[in-house]
Amino acid sequence: MIQSKNPTTEKVLKNFKEISDKEMEKKISLAAEAFQFWKKTSFEERATLMLKLGDYLRSHAEDFSKLQMLEMGKTMKSGPIGIKKCALLCDYYADNAENILKNEILQTDHKEQYVKFDPLGIVLAIMPWNFPFWQVYRFAVPALMAGNVGLLKHASNVPQCAQEIEKSFLASGFPRGVFQNLFLSPGRVEGLIRDNRIAAVTLTGSEKAGSEVARIAGEEIKKVVLELGGSDPFIVFADADIFEAAKLAVLSRLQGNVGQSCISAKRFIIEESIKEKFTKLVVEEFKKLSIGDPADPKTDIGPLATEQILLDVEKQVKKSVEFGAKIVYGGARRAGEGYFYLPTVLTNIKKGMPVVDEEVFGPVLPIIYFKTEMEAIQIANDTRYGLGASIFTKDIEKAKRLISQIEAGSVCVNDMVKSDPRAPFGGVKKSGYGRELGAYGIKEFVNIKNVWFG
């Protein structure tokens, strides 16, 4: 049984039956049939439908925002922004896919030689709940524009969102079978990956899930893209605009999602001479935020998505305090119903604490101090993750010098880490491999075919 549950009220909204083996076989067969004609469609035909999908998303931004608010607690204040970003993604690939994937002419001693980019087939996507619409379109839009078809195994706690995503493709004119949702338990995913008709797999999720999917796909020799956890460093030097850095620190920690984001800043590495000022400023920023019902347009912070996430955050903070961390602000769940955790600022942070060593999926802001550039970089890289990083300084030459020393897929100077349809997104180390978005993202699920004439 797949369950939709409201994290604000803790009440079950709806139950869904898992699909049977027979139903799944029908969906895979339909996807395989759809690929045979979809791969032959022109970029113009695909772009026309993709632009319609973008329009559909814009016209349903409020409805989809309400749905993700009900299923995983995202605020109505931030919801429409994310849905409209999905529409921009559709526009970007509709306008640029053909040019990105055009034949690449090579200058060799052959009469003619070029590289062409052919679709692979059925791409299976295993997607998370934290951005239930954006994460799915982020894979599906470039994959479909390249001529692939998609199967979605969404997170079990956002089934209504998953249904609406499939509906959005059909309503926009995409043929049946080009994109399908599967109500499937995690235990049945392995068999799906091993199906010979599945050409490739993409997963956004935990390090553990990524490792398991990579193992299975590796045994089957199938292409995989993994976007996993993050423990992004947020480095602030004394010469930075401290007020702007503090404001962006809070925005980056929360990411419009109560800190439930892989690319949220999670370790705040602050030059020692400004530690008191910075700490005071982030506490002031947290105090400005409204906590409560995510349906209220004034609410900045809603509940965490599930009870287990709330329990995990509580445990991580409690254990860190036992190891010597100091609670400057917050540090507890909010009384009453719902999976609410108060925005929290911690100091006296050191290696070995869960808030440093683990990924914290909640509004917890740990502050670590440094004295030298070398120490700042050492702390930033002292993690098994490598998704994104931010550097705040007015000395741009210093920032440029440090960029190459940071082990991350993205580095932002005087800004917070965020994804953009036009630019590649992904990480290194335990944050995964492969890229989504931009020109690099659409080329992940194509056959890079070398062609020449003798």
Image (cartoon, rainbow, N blue to C red):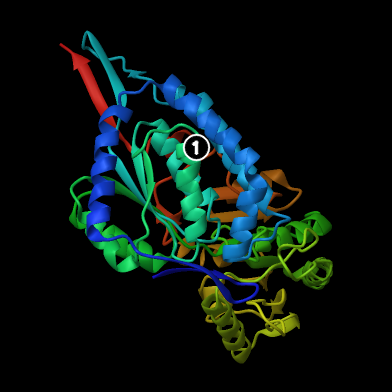
Question: Count the marks: how many?
Answer: 1
Residue on which the image places disc 1: 171
Q: Residues within 10 Å of mark 1 (few under 14, many from 20)?
A: some
Residue type at tag 1: Ala
Quarter of the image for residue 264 reads bottom right
Kind of element beneath mark 1: helix
Quarter of the image for residue 251 reads bottom right
Give percent across and percent down for residue 79: 66, 53
Identity of the residue drawn at 22% across and 8% down: 111
The quarter in which the N terminus is drawn is bottom left
Q: Is residue 61 visible?
A: yes
Give percent across and percent down for residue 178: 36, 38
| 75 sits left or right of 150 in the view | right
Identity of the residue drawn at 50% across and 34% down: 172
- 83 relative to 213, above or below: above
Quarter of the image for residue 328 reads bottom right
- Observer-nearest of 306 and 146: 306
The residue furthest left is: 454
Identity of the residue drawn at 72% across and 73% down: 343
Q: Is residue 217 visible?
A: no
The quarter in which the C terminus is drawn is top left
Give percent across and percent down for residue 223: 28, 47
- Observer-nearest of 5 and 191: 5
| 425 sits left or right of 184 in the view | right
Give percent across and percent down for residue 232: 57, 61
The residue furthest top is: 111
